[in-house]
Image (cartoon, grey):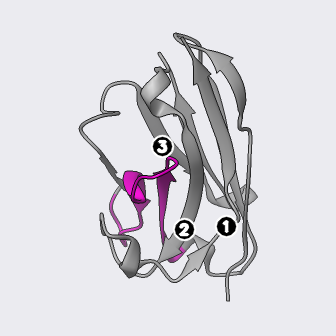
Amino acid sequence: QVQLVESGGGLVQAGVSLRLSCAASGRTFSRYTVGWFRQAPGKEREFVAAISWSLGNPYYADYADSVKGRFTISRDNAKNTVYLQMNSLKPEDTANYYCAAGATRSYYSHDYDYWGQGTQVTVSS
């Protein structure tokens, strides 16, 4: 069982940065893929980024095209935390951001078993 708690959201102006955190419980957290998804009002939940675990290899990081080059996902297994550094924020990044944990490397929300409650990010123009 893994429990996830997001933090770091807020109301910011376009062009600035925010860092979201996803704190997890569970002794095997380091072996889960952790993804960030977002959902804006009236829209479907969409993939943002994910960081996966691979025995003997560096972690793999995947990004949606809309955030590539602006967002960076990282993890600190000693702190059981995954971060999403969001730079050059745009109004279209406004959404509720969720972190999720799953057993496989995936872009799809249905592949993730555990979800946090979300943190709101609002970017004004």
Q: CA distance from mark 2 to mark 1?
A: 6 Å
Q: At 32% from the left edge and 69% from the top edge, which residue is drawn?
A: 108
Q: The disc labelled 1 sits on which kind of residue? A: Gly
Q: Where, quadrant-wise, is the C terminus in this rendering?
A: top right
Residue 16 numbered tag: none
Q: Residue type at mark 2: give it.
A: Ala
Whole-percent x and y of residue 107? 30, 63
- Report the mark closest to the observer, 3 or 2: 2
Residue 118 percent across, percent down from the top left: 67, 57
In the shown orientation, is residue 86 left or right of residue 12? Answer: left
Instruction: Establish if 104 lies above or below 66.
Output: below
Q: Would you say residue 82 sits in the magenta stretch?
A: no
Residue extending farthest left: 65
Q: Are marks 2 and 1 in contact (CB under 8 Å)?
A: yes
Is 80 left or right of 58, judged from the image as shown?
A: right
In 3D space, how far apart are the residues under numbered discs 3 and 2 (Cα atoms)?
13 Å
Question: Alpha-carbon neighbours of circle 1 within 10 Å: few (<14), some, or many (≥20)?
Answer: many
Which residue position holds label 1? 116
The residue carrying mark 2 is: 100
Q: Is residue 49 in the magenta section?
A: yes
Q: Magenta stretch? A: 31-57
Q: Who comes first in sequence, dot 3 or dot 2?
A: 3
Count how many numbered circles sit on residues in the image: 3
Q: Which percent across, then down, holds residue 117?
A: 71, 64
Q: Is residue 4 left or right of residue 31?
A: right
Q: Which mark is residue 73?
A: 3
Mark toward the viewer: 1 or 3: 1
Name the residue type under label 3. Answer: Ile
